[in-house]
Image (cartoon, grey):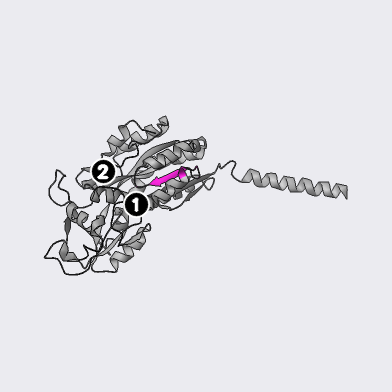
Amino acid sequence: MKYLAKTALSGALALLLVVASCGPKNGSGVIKIDGSSTVFPLCEAVAEEFQKHKQGKVKVTVGISGTGGGFKKFVRGETDISNASRPILKEEMDQAKANGIEYIELPVCFDALTVAVNPQNDWVSSMTVEELKKIWEPDAQSKITRWNQIRPEWPDEEIVLFGAGADSGTFDYFTEAIVGKAKSSRGDFTASEDDNVLVQGMAGSKYALGYLPYSYYSANSSRLKALAIQWDENSVKEPVMPTLENVLQGTYNPLSRPLFIYINRKAMEKPEVREFVEFFLNNAAKLAQEVKYLPLPPRAYELALERFRKEDIGTAFGGTPEVGLQVEEILTRTPKH
């Protein structure tokens, strides 16, 4: 009996050792990513290609908690990489510092944040930033509700508004660019961190107006109509459409923005995380186009790889949002942390 008990115990220990050797050690073999729904399609595409490349030896999980939700997890050390459609904010930087989290900030592609209407809308093809501000600023709530309040020749019909949820980096960026202060917005609109919900809403109402990432517009261009944007501060005084050419030329302002990934420096001790980030930067341009995103110029990816390999920790923004920056300027600034 003693022999049998010993044998059974030895067998159980052996089984545990086999399971342990097959599974990830100290997180090795698993890369945890969360954050922006805007960055998700690109990150998911990279993750799928990387996992094929590694032939199942590495598992990459990609969540969609929104930029703010992703940073909450990231600054607690719960994820290896955070996707973000805006730079890290001062309070998030402070939380990361308090928790001993160091990070590297890398732009990975462009977004031309797109203002869109229903295709049946035949009265508007462009809007000015001032008109958008008149619609979206907090004082507009319950006051600016009809199309003819923006331009008298437009219909006396209710504007049905759709926009990003408050935990979304898209919400932060749009309000900063249009209203002049991040998170400053009217509240009486249909809000969602899920951009597909916004697409469905705008496609379902003739009098809809909303904003969403370019990739979601581009994938649904038969169901939505993009508007050209006129910005008085722009050197180009005519309304400008959201296109790759206009983004690269710096004329689609103030709604052109870079999208980011943030890498936990400690996570870089795992070889698969380092390999994944290099794979991301080397393949982002190709995969971005496949999922209807706007790739960075080749030089920007070179600078991003250089920053990653040098482990330049911190952010180029210092916790304060900025609109209309060239990506090369972001990558040549000395990061703050």
Q: Quadrant of residue 321?
A: top left
Q: Residue at x 84, y 50 (%)?
A: 4
Tag count: 2
Task: Indicate yes or no whether the magenta region holds residue 295.
Answer: no
How far apart, in angstroms, are the residues tagged by discs 2 and 1? 26 Å
Q: Quadrant of the C terminus?
A: top left
- Residue 12 vs 299, above or below: the answer is below
Residue at the extreme right: 1
- Percent across and percent down for residue 106 are 37, 39
User: Upstream in the sequence, badge 2 or badge 1?
Assistant: 1
Badge 2 is on which residue? Answer: 323
Q: Which amino acid lies under the numbered mark 1 shown in the image of this protein?
A: Glu
- Percent across and percent down for residue 113 are 27, 52
Badge 1 is on which residue? Answer: 290
Q: With 144 as the anchor, is 76 left or right in this view? A: right
- Percent across and percent down for residue 107 are 34, 41
At mark 2, the secondary structure is loop
Q: Which residue occupies the foreground of this view, 17 or 160?
A: 160
Q: Which amino acid lies under the numbered mark 2 shown in the image of this protein?
A: Val
At mark 1, the secondary structure is helix
- Whether residue 101 is visible here, answered yes or no, is no
Magenta-highlighted residues: 74-85
Q: Residue at x 40, y 46 (%)?
A: 83
Q: Quadrant of residue 186?
A: bottom left
Q: With 40 as the anchor, is 19 left or right in this view? A: right
